[in-house]
Image (cartoon, grey):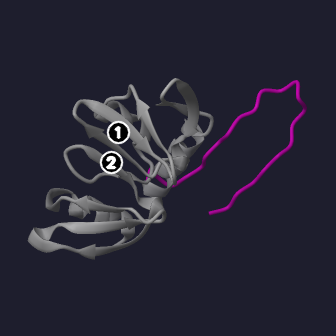
Amino acid sequence: MKISIEEIPKSKEEEVVIRCHGMNEEVMALLHKLKTAGEKLIGMQGEEIHRLSLEDVYYFDTVDQKSFLYCETEVYETKLKLYEFEELAAGSHFFRASKSTVINAMKISHVKPSFSGRFEAYMDNGEKLMVSRGYVPALKKLLGL
């Protein structure tokens, strides 16, 4: 893929043009990255409100009707519902891993098969997450298996 950058005067509006033979996964991922580059998530820890980048999130999980964003070492509660997080992360490296969990595939260090067709996903921060057998094909597709 060829990349060209042209500097323009500040008086002109910035523009990104993508010339492609057709929409494929690579182009879709690039579009998503451009659209969500400045987008921030809101996470809460007690009385503190934090702005988080989607790239910093290792996984999103719902427990007892509450939603949480898990980063490298911190956990934040969020008002987002599972479907809202999925919509926000659509076209990126996030995938549904179970009824209540969405994982960032870019933060997985390795995976291994488990019993009953499930997989264990080991995250870069040392956590281990289960991928339900119904969602294993999505994981394999993201990892190129």
CA neighbours of label 1 inside 10 A, class few (<14), some (14 to 19), many (20+): some
Q: Which residue lies under the disc numbered 2? A: 102
Q: Amino acid at mark 2?
A: Val
Of badges 2 and 1, nearer the viewer stands 2
| Label placed on residue 138 | none
Q: Which residues are magenta?
A: 1-24
20 displayed left or right of 114: right
Q: Which residue lies under the disc numbered 1? A: 86
The secondary element bearing badge 2 is classed as strand
The location of residue 32, given as percent across then percent down, is 51, 43
The location of residue 80, given as percent across then percent down, is 37, 28
Q: Residue at x 88, y 24 (%)?
A: 11
The location of residue 123, given as percent across then percent down, is 42, 64
The chief SS type of the magenta part is: loop
Locate residue 75: give its quadrant: top left
CA neighbours of label 2 inside 10 A, class few (<14), some (14 to 19), many (20+): many
**Do the CB atoms of the residues marked 2 and 1 lie less than 8 Å apart?**
yes
Q: Residue at x 87, y 37 (%)?
A: 8
Locate residue 33: give its quadrant: top right
Which is nearer the N-term, disc 2 or disc 1? 1
The location of residue 57, given as percent across then percent down, is 48, 47
Verify whether residue 4 appears in magenta. yes
